[in-house]
Image: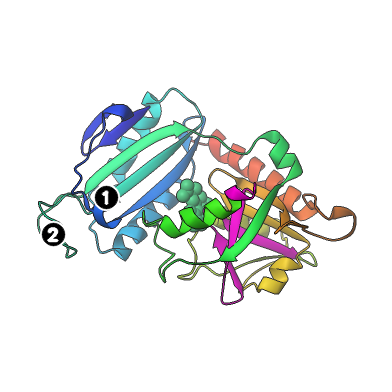
């Protein structure tokens, strides 16, 4: 696999950073994750904007212009053998000569990218939907920043892995926040609900696409706090992310999601939204001039 590190393209296995890198010592950095279809980065401008917001959130100057970012990303995509990829971008506050929490003056940020094959859910999983569990949201008060400090996400995700589920949906003070690496949508009485993009959740790029699609197709939706009770009694639940796209959750804490004949199966609103998403993605890719 190909990587880019601080100005150089190289095989991923040869990339090296200092143990004094502040990303390693303090998780002092941010990241992005861009899905690539047929060598076209999906919503690259939106991902670069979110990267800028994350950098602003940790008070780190963007080391590259959007033109430079795009040049690096496109070259990495071109040099990677798979047509469908995921480009990972990480920027840290760089490697100091000592361990000190204060921002080091004059240190160059570390810029690291690599591309890997895009592995989404299998066709069978898409068809059947996935299991999810719930757990308390243990994270900090700035979940809108895409920080590399992912230990709460890792520990919380492992809970679902331990029980054979695909995601852990997090709850804070009786309200839904998001999954450990996904945004969450709930359908109740035909209305699509998702929590507002405040400091408790990551503003997902896929989430925005889904909301745009709901608007375009005049599907009723509301962006507002979603209570634990509304989640547990939902007609349908789905996850969104760059790799999962729109993925139905069919059991929550071992109980079937939904009611009547749709209980425990991907529901009609979820399936329609996934179909709209696929059409939208194919359209974007057709017009891709990357
Ligand atoms: N995760 N919420 C969290 C906490 C996330 O980490 C992610 C993405 C999302 C969905 O965002 P998007 O639609 O822009 O992918 C929501 C990526 C995929 C990751 O960390 O691997």
Q: Nearer the viewer, mark 2 or mark 1?
A: 1
| Side of 14 relative to 177 (left or right) | left
Tell me where residue 283 sits by quadrant: top right
Residue at the spot 42% in from the left edge and 50% down from the top edge:
47
Residue 34 drawn above or below residue 12: below
Instruction: Report whether the residue tagged 1 is closer than 8 Å to ligand 1.
Output: no
Residue at the spot 85% in from the left edge and 61% down from the top edge:
259
- The N terminus lies in quadrant: top left
Residue 118 drawn above or below residue 169: above
Q: Residue furthest front?
A: 162
Q: Which mark is residue 24?
A: 1
| Side of 59 relative to 87 (left or right) | left
Asked which colour scheme the image uses, the reply is rainbow
Near-viewer residue (174 or 234): 174
Residue 220 seen: no
Q: Which mark is residue 264?
A: none
Is disc 1 surrounded by few (<14), some (14 to 19) or many (20+) residues within 10 Å? some
Task: Pinpoint residue 149: horizontal percent, then vertical percent.
Answer: 37, 57
Instruction: Report whether the residue tagged 2 is closer than 8 Å to ligand 1.
Output: no
Q: Which residues are magenta?
A: 161-187
Q: Residue furthest bottom?
A: 173
| Mark 2 → mark 1, Cα distance in angstroms | 15 Å
Residue at the spot 40% in from the left edge and 68% down from the top edge:
142
Task: Pinpoint residue 201: horizontal percent, then vertical percent.
Answer: 50, 65
Task: Pinpoint residue 231: horizontal percent, then vertical percent.
Answer: 69, 67
């Amino acid at each position: 696999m190909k990587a880019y590190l601080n100005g150089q393209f190289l095989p991923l296995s040869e990339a090296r950073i200092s143990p004094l890198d502040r990303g390693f010592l303090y998780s002092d950095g941010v990241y992005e994750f861009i899905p690539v279809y047929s060598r076209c980065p999906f919503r690259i401008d939106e991902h670069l904007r979110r990267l800028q917001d994350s950098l602003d959130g940790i008070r780190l100057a963007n080391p590259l212009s959007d033109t430079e970012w795009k040049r690096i990303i496109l070259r990495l995509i071109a040099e990677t053998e798979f047509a469908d990829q995921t480009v990972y971008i990480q920027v840290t506050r760089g490697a100091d000569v000592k361990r000190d929490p204060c921002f080091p003056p004059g240190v160059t940020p570390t810029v690291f990218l690599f591309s890997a094959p895009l592995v989404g859910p299998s066709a069978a999983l898409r068809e059947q939907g996935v299991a999810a569990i719930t757990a308390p949201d243990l994270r900090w008060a700035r979940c809108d920043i895409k920080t590399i400090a992912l230990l709460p996400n890792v520990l919380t995700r492992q809970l679902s892995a331990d029980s054979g589920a695909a995601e852990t949906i997090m709850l804070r003070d009786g309200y839904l926040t998001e999954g450990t690496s996904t945004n969450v949508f709930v359908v109740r009485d035909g209305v699509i609900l998702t929590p507002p993009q405040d400091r408790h959740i990551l503003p997902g790029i896929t989430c925005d696409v889904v909301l745009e699609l709901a608007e375009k197709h005049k599907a009723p939706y509301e962006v507002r706090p979603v209570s634990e009770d509304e989640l547990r009694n939902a007609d349908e639940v789905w996850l969104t992310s760059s790799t999962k796209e729109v993925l139905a959750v069919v059991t929550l804490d071992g109980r079937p999601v939904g009611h009547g004949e749709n209980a425990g199966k991907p529901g009609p609103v979820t399936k329609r939204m996934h179909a709209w998403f696929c059409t939208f993605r194919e359209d974007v890719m057709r017009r891709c001039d990357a």
